[in-house]
Image (tube, rainbow, N blue to C red):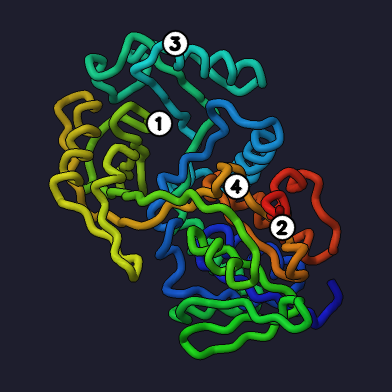
Amino acid sequence: MTAGKHVVVVGGGVLGVSTATHLQRDGVAVTLVTEGELADGASGRSLSWLNSAGTRSAAYHALRMAGIDRYRTLFAEDPTREWLRFDGGLHWSLDEDAMRARHRAEVAHAYDSKLVAPAEIPGLDPVAVPEVAVHNPGEGWVSLPHLIEHLAAEFTALGGEIVTGAGRASVTTAGGVATGVTTTGGQRFEADTVVVACGAATPSVVAELGVSIPDASPLSMLVLTEPAETGVKTVLNTPRVALRPNPGGTFALDHHWYEDRITEVADGTCSIDESVVKELAAEASALLDGGVTLTAASWKLGRKPIPGDGEPVFGELSAVPRCFVAFTHSGATLGLIAGELLAGEIRTGEPHPMLAPFRPDRFRP
């Protein structure tokens, strides 16, 4: 991309900020436009577990492992950051056969996977854990709001512009080619290329362009606790709660059993009875050794971005040239690598082979 080119990125979550930052690093002028504030959507309520556990396609696994690699590079720059850690993950299931099958599948593609007894994991109440669990020592977690703040500081220092509170954005076109963005806040941004990376809203934004991306985004909730003294450092994925450490000695909690108890109204606002929040905190407390009680400090509700087929959606829309999309369930794990590869495609015009299986055109009739 020659000097003077301009890209508008729509979305203040990790995919949007990462793509914008990588472009700006490469000398491309970028304006990042977001409906509200940075990280106030799905990135602000993500468990953000860095992993490629379980089973998935070889291409998806390879992309996730590349994503973890970029986080390890960032971690190596400053291992003291409390918002990015690699202390492993632990999974157990009520179905022991399924759990052992998961372990075998992970070992088959050289993912670091071990069967361990609960006593081997510090901070857990052994009574709360089955006799065996799957331990993945190479996994980690990131606090996406902290990462986004870190990237945004670099982005603006390099000359990038961030426009918050812009309202919902629509892509403008001329002759079928993307030419910029208009917002319900009354602003218009001209661009040579547009990137739509606005989480669960992405399918509705591109639908205005006549492009269909199936959407399976469920309602979700992330709870942040008050600080607690416990020896647990690993990410825990259990039958009734997922738990990870969080900066400041707090914990982040989520799961899916309460999805049907979240209420959403027409404007997208969500609510849940506080008794469900307390129940989730109690499920997490029951896992911890030493009688530790976790107390919810805050919780956020909204749609968790998941494409209809579960696979990521990355790349240019062939029906609307110069409009790129980034839409995936694994936004945390893929955040850095997806931004890097998309920025490279936009800057050079060369499609990256690792994104080939995840093009939006796979949904075209």
Tell me what residue is drawn at x 17 percent, y 39 percent.
279
Gap between marks 4 and 1 measured at Cα: 20 Å
Q: Quickly name the residue at label 3.
A: 97
Residue beneath disc 2? 315
Q: Which residue is mark 4?
A: 334
Contact between labelled residues 1 and 4, with CB atoms less than 8 Å apart: no
Q: Is residue 36 left or right of residue 223?
A: right
Asked whether the viewer can see residue 87, the reply is yes
Residue 124, image x and y in percent?
28, 23
Percent coordinates x, y for residue 231 in the rendering: 30, 29
Q: Earlier in the sequence, mark 3 or mark 4?
A: 3
Compare marks 2 and 3 and give the one earlier in the sequence: 3
- Please, what is the three-letter code of the amino acid marked with disc 2? Gly
The Cα–Cα distance between marks 2 and 3, rounded to whole angstroms, is 38 Å
The answer to whether residue 297 is left or right of residue 30 is: left
Tell me which label, 3 or 1, sits earlier in the chain.
3
Q: Amino acid at mark 3?
A: Asp
SS category of the residue bearing label 1: loop
Residue 218: x and y in percent read 40, 49
CA distance for labels 3 and 1: 23 Å
Asked if one can make out residue 76 in the rendered structure from this viewpoint, the answer is: no
Which of the pair 145/43 is nearer the observer? 43
Q: Nearer the viewer, mark 3 or mark 4?
A: 3
Residue type indicated by callout 4:
Leu
The residue wearing badge 1 is 234
Q: Could you tell me how far apart the alpha carbons at marks 4 and 2 are, in whole angstroms?
A: 14 Å
Please, what secondary structure does the residue beneath circle 4 have?
helix
